Image: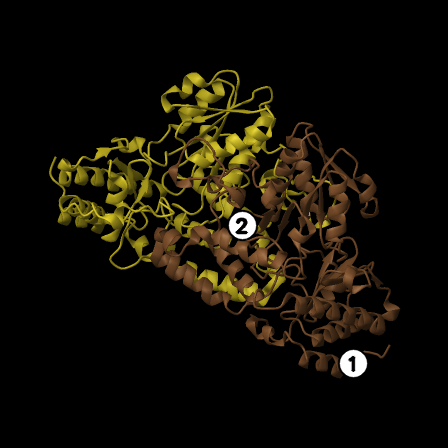
Chain colours: A yellow, B brown
Amino acid sequence: MTALTLPGLRAMDAADALKAFRARFRLPEGLVYLDGNSLGALPAAAPGRLKAVIEDEWGRGLIRSWNAADWISAPRRAGAKIARLTGAGEDEVVAADSTSINVFKALSAALQINTGRTVLLSEAGNFPTDVYMMQGLSALSGGAAQTRLVEADKLMEALDDSVCALLLTHVHYKTGAMHDMAAVTKAAHDAGALVIWDLSHSAGALPVELNACGADFAVGCGYKYLNGGPGAPAFIFAAKRHQHVFPALSGWLGHAAPFDFRDDYQPAPGIDRFQCGTPGVLGMAALETGLDLMLEADMAAIRAKSQALGDAFITLVEQECAAHGFTLASPRAADRRGSQVSFRHPEGYAIMQALIARGVIGDFRAPDILRFGFAPLYNRFEDVWDAAANLKAVMDGREWDAPQFRARAAVT
Amino acid sequence: MTALTLPGLRAMDAADALKAFRARFRLPEGLVYLDGNSLGALPAAAPGRLKAVIEDEWGRGLIRSWNAADWISAPRRAGAKIARLTGAGEDEVVAADSTSINVFKALSAALQINTGRTVLLSEAGNFPTDVYMMQGLSALSGGAAQTRLVEADKLMEALDDSVCALLLTHVHYKTGAMHDMAAVTKAAHDAGALVIWDLSHSAGALPVELNACGADFAVGCGYKYLNGGPGAPAFIFAAKRHQHVFPALSGWLGHAAPFDFRDDYQPAPGIDRFQCGTPGVLGMAALETGLDLMLEADMAAIRAKSQALGDAFITLVEQECAAHGFTLASPRAADRRGSQVSFRHPEGYAIMQALIARGVIGDFRAPDILRFGFAPLYNRFEDVWDAAANLKAVMDGREWDAPQFRARAAVT
């Protein structure tokens, strides 16, 4: 294989079908941002849109904006946009609450649908909040539900007739390894289990076909590849056939007639019953701005570029940092990876801090993972070069071996 | 009693100790806004603060802002500010999620603490989401919890030895009637029940003394009198003695060590365990701006002005609209009211729409309530005059009797 060079990578940028999208984000000059899988960048349209929401809709419209600016429809409007990115029907997705809360809704719905089965199954090492919400629901259920975690390669054999629902993150947050959604869903269904997909690291990063795969429920995060802003509202998908459940988190905005203010909960028809409390309007507005931008792009082009960026990064790190003890933690095959590449290193935390100090932002996940996310709408092949070159400099100069890089911050 | 006059009310404004606060909000010229109990007005500082969060912290700081801008502490920082307004300890309140979700947390905590008792008791006609969340939890519990609703005047006798928790809204959303928090809490405790107070219509509107009253849990809304913006994060109070429960909504940010990414949920010590998913940063920033402004004001002065505004409005409506069939729905005694005055009228919906068309904004609550909220930081006695004068004009001219005012909007 020919060694990758900076001119070669720049030529790939020049030929990139998505290159115009980078200017649609505000990115700090000189920064190489490979953490869009943790917090997506600021869409250039967001400050103006939010200024209008804050000053005009809130400031001048005040309470009237629930109707006049149609704030009340934001969860469904954003949900319909997410549906287009995830192969769902527009009446099957709603933006609401956090991923954690939506996991709870999906799990408790599954327990109602798949009665007689009590096990909530997931993968050991799945993103913690998915597992924690299972544990909370299990504790609350007084024995009516139990949490079971098994290693990823034991999932299929764990699908016995006690399993009510299998909850998996489609793309693993640490390794970027991607489950085969169609195959896993089919296997679970064959075993009588429902499947809940956490799309936090998939939505906006790669093609997702929830209905083609027969998925039952899905949840996901608005602030990663969807560029919805810090702590953006999350989303939940419930297949049409499952929209009859009584929501455990039965808040007033999931009611059939919330403004009748009746004493008895009557769930709204359809996906609306998965709303709960009053939506955060500022967060919804930022999320919609990110979604509108993403919907302008072609998802096949996003996926192709994402794979090429990841491949290039693996090649460069192995080419430039061969002696420095990194182990690839992600699948080498691009079709088995999401839109990130992770390496393991025993000094991963300090190395990442030293890299950040050089203006290359990835992140660290305990105990030893350095994560690099590729957001094809704004990351360039040149960024991949810069990241690898700076990583080499950090390692060659042992820059990471300094107290300021070893001291752990509150958020890693 | 001497009739109230516009010059007299203007003199009260001139003497108002809080009058300087009005300029700290951006209010549309010419609008009389008496709906701060539904959505608080825009603090003048909020657009600038949010611009900084959006453009600097999100846009330039990106993922680093969780540490550098201390986003991660926003729920506790806002919680400590709310604690000062509600007579709680700063380590007893956290801003998080919606009021609905926080009701669920408090109810499920109560079921863990007060074991052997299964009834969740509330008032018929309480704000629906409180009741709906009880119903959802009861359904989820498979019989381990039951919802019981009784009329307000039957609450005390309903406190039998099956009652686990009594959930009440301190100030009723329709009538503005205020429960005696100390007396009700004591009666419930004497009967062996815990008490959960919904402070949505109290926090920021009047003095609340959660700990002096011995309250067990409380929840409340950030977007009413706290001026936190549309759909602002809500809050939950858990008395120190109750912070040992295993949270049913056990999301990753309630974990003792969220960034260790372990498979087993270990609740954080103290109030942090009542956090769940990633907080909405934009919403938190707006909420903190509202809280900071409110904390500059004296709560006793807020309460005194609120009562005077309400008294003046009752007097004026009865003085100016005596022949038009309004019935006072709020307690006449100011010390039994929150910071709103409600009137009943069979044509309430259309009347309110006609009033809004004249630039006087209150709201309607089915079936027949016209609600007028008084936010002492920005409402003036002159506003009260204008509201009553316009109400008189709407009634004298039968302006309400027009198709455009009878057609119901999505949000009332």
Where disc 2 sits, the SS reads loop
Q: Position of residue B13 (x, y in %)?
A: 68, 78
C-alpha separation, residue under disc 2 versus residue under disc 1: 47 Å
Instruction: Name the one closer to the observer, B195 or B168.
Output: B195
Q: The residue marked by circle 1 belongs to what chain?
A: B
- Residue B392 lies, with reference to residue A235, above or below; the image says below
Residue A113 in which image quadrant: top right
Three-letter code, disc 1 = Thr
The picture places residue A376, in percent across and down from the top left corner, at 31, 46
Q: Return the disc, 2 or 1, that comes first in the chain's sequence.
A: 1
* A188 relative position to A14: left or right: right
Mark 2 Cα-neighbour bin, 10 Å: few <14, some 14–19, many ≥20 = some
- Residue at 48% x, 49% y: name it: B279
Mark 1 residue crowding within 10 angstroms, few (<14) / some (14–19) / many (20+): few
Viewer-proximal residue among B396 and A367: A367
> Dot 1 corresponds to which residue?
B5
Q: Residue at x 61, y 48 (%)?
A: B99
In front here: B399 or A387? A387
Instruction: Indicate the amino acid at tag 2.
Output: Asp
* Residue depicted at x 68% and y 74%: B380
Residue to which mark 2 is pinned: B91
Q: Residue at x 30, y 54 (%)?
A: A22
